[in-house]
Amino acid sequence: MKVMRLILAAVASIGLMASVFAQETGTKDEAKVMVDAAVEHVKKVGPEKAFKDFSTDAAWKKKDLYVMAYDNKGVCVAHGANEKLIGRNLSDLKDPNGVMVVAELTKVATNKGQGWVDYSWPHPQTKKLEDKSTYVRKLQNYEGWVGVGIYR
């Protein structure tokens, strides 16, 4: 009987941990809502202030979601998970599968106005390389785009 209680407690703990982790993982819908809000924020306060906010203000980070912004040359102008990327030209950055990450995100934003791109990227919480899908949207008052990605 005691062993059975331990097994049930262990199973319940695993279920609880999975539930907690699931709550910490953003969804495609949440990513799109954040991108739309980011675009509106750029319109409202201007690119310079908005990019600073995206990089430093906790309001632009939810669960494992964060806002990133790049200019059309591939230079990171805001990054909610890694400020060390700001100012770096990442247009040649490839993931382990050969996806030109920033170049592909820029291409989708520039040519389609918005859309999803799949690639691999280090998870900000686990630091492990994971599959990611990022929703990007072209900015109207800046030669660049904003995006938010989900880990799959």
Image: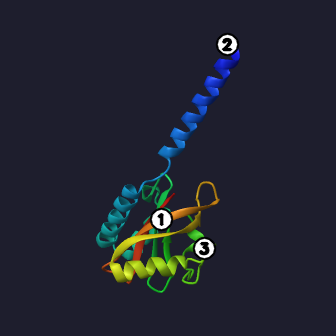
Disc nearest the viewer among 3 and 2? 2
- Residue 79 or residue 136, whichever sits in front: 136
Above-or-below relation of 15 to 2? below
Q: Which x, y percent locates residue 112?
A: 34, 79
**Which residue is painted at 39% across and 69% down in the image?**
50
Q: Toward which corner of the image does residue 32 lie, by quadrant?
A: bottom left
Q: Toward which corner of the image does residue 125 lie, by quadrant?
A: bottom right
- Residue 117 or residue 140, whichever sits in front: 117
Dot label at residue 95: 3
**Which residue is painted at 43% across and 82% down in the image?**
107
Sequence-first tag of 3 and 2 = 2
Q: Which x, y percent locates residue 128?
A: 65, 59
Looking at this rendering, what residue extends furthest in the top direction?
A: 1
Above-or-below relation of 33 to 102? above
**Which residue is painted at 37% across and 82% down in the image?**
110
**Which residue is painted at 54% across and 83% down in the image?**
91
The kind of residue tagged 3 is Asp
Q: Which residue is mark 2?
A: 1
What separation in Å lies between label 1 and label 2 (alpha carbons)?
46 Å
Dot label at residue 133: 1
Sequence-first tag of 3 and 1 = 3
The 10 Å Cα crowd at callout 2, few under 14, some 14 to 19, many 20 or more, is few
The 10 Å Cα crowd at callout 3, few under 14, some 14 to 19, many 20 or more, is some
Q: Toward which corner of the image does residue 7 lie, by quadrant?
A: top right
Tell me the SS state at disc 2.
loop
Question: Seen in the image, is 127 located left or right of residue 146?
Answer: right
The kind of residue tagged 2 is Met
Sequence-first tag of 1 and 2 = 2
